[in-house]
Image (cartoon, rainbow, N blue to C red):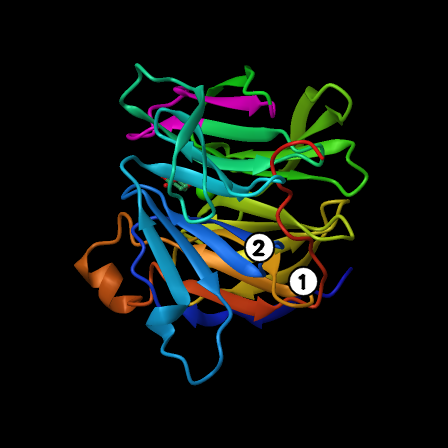
Amino acid sequence: MTAVRTSSAELAIRMECLLGEGPRWDAGDGSLIFVDVIPGKLHRLRSGREAEPESSLVRTTQLDQPLGAANPVISGGLVLAMRDGIYLSDADGANLRLLAPVEVEDTSHRMNDAACDPQGRLWAGTMSFEAVPGAGTLYRIDPDGTVTAVLHDLTISNGLGWSPDGRRMYFIDSPTRRIDVLDFDAEDGTVHDRRCFLDVSDVAGVPDGLTMDTEGGIWVAFWGGAQVRRYRHDAVLTDIVQVPVPQPTACAFGGPDGQDLYITSARLGLDQSGLQAAELSGSLFACRSGYQGSAAQAFGTN
Ligand code: BGC
Ligand code: CA
């Protein structure tokens, strides 16, 4: 039996995100991007000196649509998974250019989590605002804007990650309470043989966002479970990070040495007493992970 290491995440910056999501370490300038999905806000946290007021450390751009996730682009700027498609923008979210329309007519649908594979293609999943079962799809968006629907009949398309050898893709559709794995063909960006990597229905809450460390460990945020868990590549649980709010949503490595684990969280669905009991809900948290992760894979080709 491997001993499970338990630690606690601490407040990194107080925020009141309704649906804080998608932390991504931007290696370009050493800042952390994250979003507030439903109100369509893009946040960028830069590291500051101690004397600086916290409020000056986060720069926020208000967009005109819900924003599932934002990722850096190799040639500069960001790729944004928005309600009606994929856009390119400047680093601060300004100067939007539509790259690829997605589910434009389905106004009851929105983008949820989106991440880049090691070859720089974007994978972006949709869901209905009301989480109607089976309404979601996972798409692959190539750097030239070609959109391919890859997985159908999803409900809450969520965490995405690739093994360090680039041969496996992990994927979570939250209500299944499973972490799935698929064989990944790096050459053409196709996936094969989706299967259950781990059934996590014994853990409180549902699995949401995920990120990978350099050893191939899988870090999963449990929405409703107030924790992030690390599973080894052979599915053995090794670490539990307790989060002081019930709804952590996603996590990512960052910081100067790539060992800080940043965790976003949500206020969505908490009633008055829930918010009183966990008033830091919606904030960004962090812990020293004891593991190494990489900065966000950027979109596009070198
Ligand atoms: C979705 C939420 C959902 C949560 C847990 C998030 O990624 O945006 O709508 O409640 O996952 O499944
Ligand atoms: Ca999510």
Q: Is residue 141 left or right of residue 167?
A: left
Eyeballing the image, is 150 above or below 241? above
| Outermost residue toward the left in this view | 272
| Residue drawn where x is 73% and y is 18% of the image | 188
Eyeballing the image, is 277 above or below 44? below
Camera-side residue: 162 or 294? Answer: 294
Tag of residue 25: 2
Image quadrant of ligand 1 equals top left
Quarter residue 150 falls in: top right
Image location of residue 67, percent across then percent down: 37, 38
Which residue is under mark 1?
258
| Residue density around tag 2, few if under 14, some if 14–19, many if 20 or more, within 10 Å | many
Observer able to see residue 179: no
Which range is magenta? 126-143
Image location of residue 1, percent across then percent down: 78, 60
Where, quadrant-wise, is the C terminus in this rendering?
top right
Q: Is residue 53 left or right of residue 261?
A: left
| Residue drawn where x is 20% and y is 54% of the image | 271
| Residue drawn where x is 31% and y is 66% of the image | 278
**Mark 1–mark 2 contact, CB under 8 Å?**
yes
Observer able to see residue 42: yes
Eyeballing the image, is 278 above or below 92? below
Tag of residue 116: none
